[in-house]
Amino acid sequence: MLAGSPAPATPRCATSCGQDAKACREARCTTLHGLERRTCAEACEGIAGCASLRTLAYVVTECESDARGARLRQTLEIRRGDCDPVPVMELTAPEPVPDGFDGIGLCRLSGLFRNSPAFVLAGGVQRLGVRPDGSAVVFEVNNDVALLPFGLPSPSPQQGFFFARADGSGLRWLAPPSAAPIFDIYPVSGGSTANVFPNLPFSPDGGHVVFTDMGPGPAGETAIQIFTLDVATGGPPRQVTHLPSAASPIPGLPATGFPSFLTGDTIGFYSFANPEGLNPQEQLTAFTVRIDGTGLRALPSPVVGSDSHVVTSFAVEGSGGRLATLVLPGTPVNPYPGASGFFGSLINEVFFVNGRHLVQLTDFHRVDTFGLLLDSRRQRAVFAASANPPHGDNPTENCQLFSIDTLGAHLRQLTHFREGDHSVPGCDSGPPPGGCSVSLSTLAREDPATGTIVFDSSCDPFGTNPFGVQLFAVQANGSRLRTLTHARGYVVAPDGSFTTELVGNWDYAPSVR
């Protein structure tokens, strides 16, 4: 059966990044002088990953595959400051199993395309959230929703929602797992792909988390609903909504999803459902509801133009306005052949939304421009895009992090990733050397105290991540890029066996979301 157990908390902070940076400088930089030496030293700091972090929780998934089959192993780790990561829970499938997903195998496909979110299809750690003050982590282990049998048993006493302190101690079970998966799989040319929504948002006081689960609707029908869970007491989750059943017309989107706390007693979410006649057209609509289930209302949709058919595909909420990515009509300049859903044939642009008033921040006409966060001062938006704007520095049209002020001015490119002569997939995941991506599974986070932006990426800025997915940190002005994790990526042995080790679901706090 599944080997899953709490790992002992580290009695004191072990720090190796300083020694790693020193060893790198001695090996690479001692014969250099002037600017070359300073550049080399900064690269060593970036490789070692010393950074002023608070609480960073993430999942590392390793899949070993040979003639006997594939064997999966997952570890949930927490890193604070410059301390080495502490393992919280380890999950291991005892025996190799056949891996025939899409005719290639999930392990090989995830490695080739550097697509770490795909591992949630095999079960294990699903939803994940860090308490707003950084003091604890809540996560879900769920094999019941797995689409691919990797030897992770279902059901299992080790399934459900769990709580752990930020130092890795105090692991305890809270509640059964959700019956609503965090992924939506859909066909594309030559195979299939999945959108993954792993976030587990906390209430501002850290007392509750919100998520989707299956529950009864107004006529007793089973549908996706919004639930909350008391972190202190655990127990049965509380159903907040009673939405009627609905279907999503957009590939890769659930019928109801993206729940988050807007205030301590108000939850926001999106749905195609028509509760109480509030959404008669059954369009993708933003709703709010009180935590006790009362006061359900639909929010007015922002309007870009009289001839536009806008779908609010994603939004980051916050007081004083919010950041939204809107799908606009028209033909993008970089359509993805054979793709569908958000990526593929639709233009995505980033907007600043305040009530029904919008300011369009980007005008790239591309399929892969997505808003990630508003900074702590609510003055600049951070987004991902593969554009090469005027006066920019992205001639290969690789996926990059950018920021811009909320009036749509003073565009700044924060990263300068480059892989190959020209990026093929843009901000979608793909095999090297066609281009690398950022924000594969989770929106970027900004630490309001330090201005540090944490994000995940398949890019290789220091020559240490040629076939992997890692977590990175960068300052808001684009300086001090740091590698925070060191998973091995996709490695093929001479006998044809291979190992895929990637960083997947993650969260960071305290942060701006």
Image (cartoon, rainbow, N blue to C red):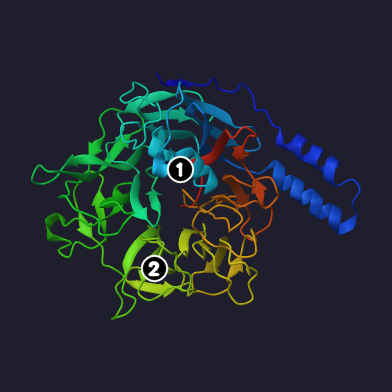
As shown in the figure, which amino acid type bears the numbered disc 1?
Answer: Ile
* Disc 1: which residue: 104
Viewer-side residue, 189 vs 416: 189
As shown in the figure, which amino acid type bears the numbered disc 2?
Answer: Ser
The residue shown at (46%, 74%) is 365
Other residues around mark 1 within 10 Å, as few (<14) / some (14–19) / many (≥20):
few
Image depth: mark 2 or mark 1 in front: 1
Viewer-side residue, 475 vs 314: 314
| Residue 70 seen anywhere in this rendered image of the structure | yes
Q: Which mark is residue 454?
A: none
Vertical position of residue 504 compared to residue 252: above or below: above
Of callouts 2 and 1, which one flags the residue occurring earlier in the amino acid sequence? 1
Percent across and percent down for residue 472 are 60, 48
Q: Quadrant of the N terminus?
A: top left
The residue shown at (38%, 61%) is 342
| Residue 487 seen anywhere in this rendered image of the structure | no
Residue 360 in the figure: left or right of residue 15: left
Q: Give the CA distance from mark 2 to mark 1.
A: 26 Å
Q: Which mark is residue 345?
A: 2
Other residues around mark 2 within 10 Å, as few (<14) / some (14–19) / many (≥20):
many
Percent across and percent down for residue 339 are 40, 60
Viewer-side residue, 307 vs 426: 426
Task: Name the element at disc 1.
Answer: loop
Toward the bottom, the furthest residue is 306
Percent across and percent down for residue 38 are 83, 53
- Number of numbered discs: 2
The residue shown at (36%, 29%) is 232
The residue shown at (32%, 42%) is 210
